[in-house]
Amino acid sequence: MSGDRSGDATDAIPDGGTVTEETAGGSGGSALAGLRERDDFVVVAMAAALVVFPFLLIDILGAVGDVIGISIGGYTGLPSLVLIYGIIVIGFNLLLGYTGLLSFGHAAFFGSAAYSAALFSQVVPSPILMVIVGTIVATLLAWPIGFVSIRRSGVYFAVLTLTFGQALYFWALGPGSWLTNGDNGFSGIEAHGLFLGAIPLDAQLIPVFDSYTVMYAFTAVVMLIAVWVGNRIINSPYGLIFEALGENEERVEFVGLNVFRYKLMAFIISAVFAGVGGAMFVIHEQYIHPTTALYWIQSGDFVIMTVLGGTGSLVGPVLGALVFEYVANVISGVSLPMIGSIGSLWRFVLGAVFVFIVWVFPRGIYGAFSDLGSRLLGEDPEEPAVADGGERE
Amino acid sequence: MLLLQSEIASILLNGLQQGAIYALLGIGLTIILGTMEFLNLAHGALYLVGAYTGLIVFQETALSNGLLYSSGITTLGFEGGFLAALIVVPIVGFGIGLLMERFVAEPFYDRPETDQLLVTFGLALIVEETVKNVIGGNTFQSIAPSTILGVNVSQPISLPLVGLFPSWRLFIIAIAFLVIGLTYLAIERTDFGLVVQAGTHDSEMVRILGIPINRSYSLVFALGAALAAFAGLIGASIQTVSPQIGTQQALVPAFLTIVVGGAGSVRGAIAGGLVLGLIISAMTQTYSQWAQIVLYLFVALMLVFKPEGLFGSAEVGE
């Protein structure tokens, strides 16, 4: 899923049988191009990447780390965490990358789903039901917030979403603490495992590789569903309209389409993804606090991940989630020979990487790699598929 | 709840004080947005720089962690006093503003506004983390002096209606409004201000008329930065100082201020700042738990029902 990993993923596809048949006749470059044109290519590629992801992140990087004497391997829970944020930013990108709306309030949907899932777990501790309940609550919240916010665009939209998110944050911290437990946070949230608790989430799937837990499989399946749904949306007429909205809203209106309705749907869809992620997050972390769940910095993190990965493609933002969480959880623990411990500098590193990416690669890591790939194959680099911002005349 | 006269008076005074900070921040943000159509999410970082510069110039501060501490420097500061800070901080802000305009803002003038938001957001992150790692992440006490120009300002004074009120805060309110007034005059009454106003209205036309608007751009950006840094100094003299204040106490309120006042309007930023300051002050004194919530919902209502703000046109930044 990072650069080398997406390479692995494409290499792994020919084993998938059906995909190779159509493209078998082509030469190297065009075979890959033909493969890429298939609608479900991204889902198959993601599935392959998900199979090898924990192995690469934990075992291979861990082994490399042992050799060079710097621990750069991930820990057991990291792959699941990356996927959870990945799910959220796939949805967030439908709003930012395709429709061109920058929200600074998606923590509201993430957090409300997390809290509802946490509260619901005290009644029925089923992870699947927790996700469903959390997602429903996030969706119900997104409707009115979207209904109001969509009426404005540009920075006003960003500020409106921010205000609603912040109002919810301060409510959870103060007046709402009878429900949310306020500044103490909710701890000891336990989901009882899949299939009526028959399979605990922390059980291992494969004996030797302890990174493949049931929780990972669960998040991987949800991720695949998310990619499939996202892919269906962007390849549908609906998704085309989202993209058109990002490019030129006025024209969409002149064609006679109800701009407001499509923007609202894009907003709600992105909130659904944030809700799924929020509920999964609480299952994974077993603890939730207003600052991690609802504060606007969390919304900002979604923005960072999405832009870092690349807004022009469906799965690009997942790369951003990977880089973000890797820097936050692994690089932050690294101690370098000359510089010493990275420790609390990780956010500084992240900010610098972020500014660099926005500056030099407006299409993110994914865009940079796909340009590089096209250049190597002798094609012209793609034009940016999506104009973000887009409100300018 | 019935409020006593004295309570109302102190709500007003506290509101003025908070409102002045919001207005200073809002003016800076709004002239930058208005003239250059540049959205600066690093505006809070300038406030942060102002607060820390003030801290360093004002007194010698003991460090307890951070890069400087671990490299053997345990105290930091010049013992310059508050008047020195009053001069140094805006100059530092002005300089940073010039640099920012030249090296960060300019390459992004022609890029989508989302890119501007993103790059300045990243910059804000870098500044906050730099301060946290170099000077330390702990919270410092506010930097109110006991005397200023030989006048004792540490004692509360008795005011009609209000009762006892910290005289230091009165001084702060006075000096903040002096700066706000001067800025207002500079933009309403000078040639420079005229160019700024015209640029807010139609920057293309100003350029066509042969006015070197790029030079004005640098000055406007630097002026906005100096005001934000000055707001940081004022804030640091009444509130504690920590690396988070840039985003928490400056960036978000600054945006709320210009949204309420109307983007691109100096008058709007002043009015917006005062309105928000009074709301916060009134709520804090009555139902403090709900203060922030009411503030945000008020702004949301404003955006929905009066999107052009108190004094603005709805077009800027949209």
Image: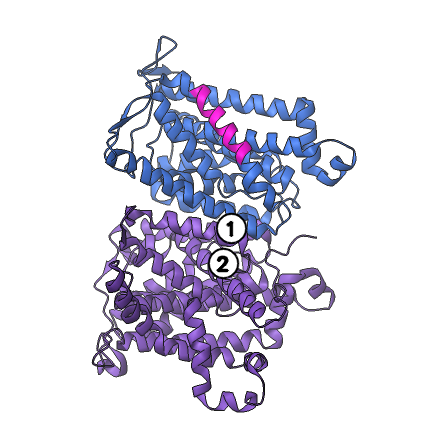
Chain colours: A purple, B blue
Question: Looking at the image, do the residues carrying marks 1 and 2 touch, with CB atoms under 8 Å apart?
Answer: yes
Q: Position of residue B54 (x, y in %)?
A: 39, 25
Q: Quadrant of the N terminus of chain B?
A: top left
The amino acid type found where label 2 is placed reads: Val
The lab-note entry on whether marks 1 and 2 share a chain reads: no
User: Is A158 on the left-hand or right-hand side of A64?
Assistant: right
Q: Which residues are magenta?
A: B86-99
Residue drawn at x 66%, y 27% as measured from the top left: B193
Q: Secondary structure at mark 2?
A: helix
Residue at coordinates 70% horizontally, 60% vertically from top-left? A250
Answer above or below: position of A148 versus B299.
below
Which SS type dominates the magenta stretch? Answer: helix
Label number found at residue B118: 1
Give the residue number, with chain letter if any, for mark 2.
A307
Residue A77 visible in the shown view: no
Task: Give the chain letter at badge 1.
Answer: B
